[in-house]
Image: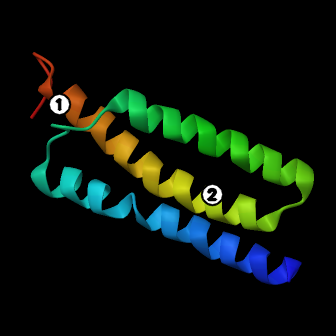
Amino acid sequence: MKQMIAVIFGVGLLGNAMLFVPQALAVWRKKSDEGVSLITFGGFNVLQAIGIVHGAYQHDYSLIIGLGASLVTCGTVTGLTLYYRAQRRPGAEA
């Protein structure tokens, strides 16, 4: 039973990672960061990084892999947001 719950938890974390993909695609397609809260996504990134470190200390590969995937997808949104905000600044190259 413990192993089954661990697998379900890992799949849930991967599902969590997939929830960031539509936002990343929307930002990329629109070439705009409009409507994206950098504080929110930055906070998600910090929490995911802390979770990965915790998973490493606990030898919990579900946490490491699931939150690692979330960090990649959420980090993509954060990175694109930073990029498009930099492009909006006066004097930024188009």
Give residue 87's mark: 1
Q: Secondary structure at mark 2?
A: helix
Q: Residue at x 35, y 62 (%)?
A: 21
Label whose residue precedes the other's in the sequence (1 or 2): 2
Q: Nearer the viewer, mark 1 or mark 2?
A: 2
Q: Secondary structure at mark 1?
A: helix
**Which quadrant does the N terminus fall into?**
bottom right
Q: Which residue occupies the foreground of this view, 77 or 6?
A: 6
The residue that label 2 is drawn on is: 68
Q: Residue at x 35, y 31 (%)?
A: 38
The image position of residue 3, as x and y in percent, is 85, 81
Relative side of 9 to 75, left or right: right
The image position of residue 6, as x and y in percent, is 78, 74
Relative side of 36 to 17, left or right: left
Residue kind at label 1, given as amino acid type:
Gln
Q: Is residue 46 above or below residue 10?
A: above
Q: CA distance from mark 1 to mark 2?
A: 28 Å
The image position of residue 66, as x and y in percent, is 64, 64
Q: Is residue 90 above or below residue 21?
A: above
Relative side of 54 to 87, left or right: right
Q: Which residue occupies the foreground of this view, 2 or 35?
A: 2
Give residue 77's mark: none
**Which quadrant does the C terminus fall into?**
top left
Residue lying at the far right of the rendered structure: 58
Residue kind at label 2, given as amino acid type:
Gly
The image position of residue 41, as x and y in percent, is 42, 38
Q: Residue at x 65, y 42 (%)?
A: 49
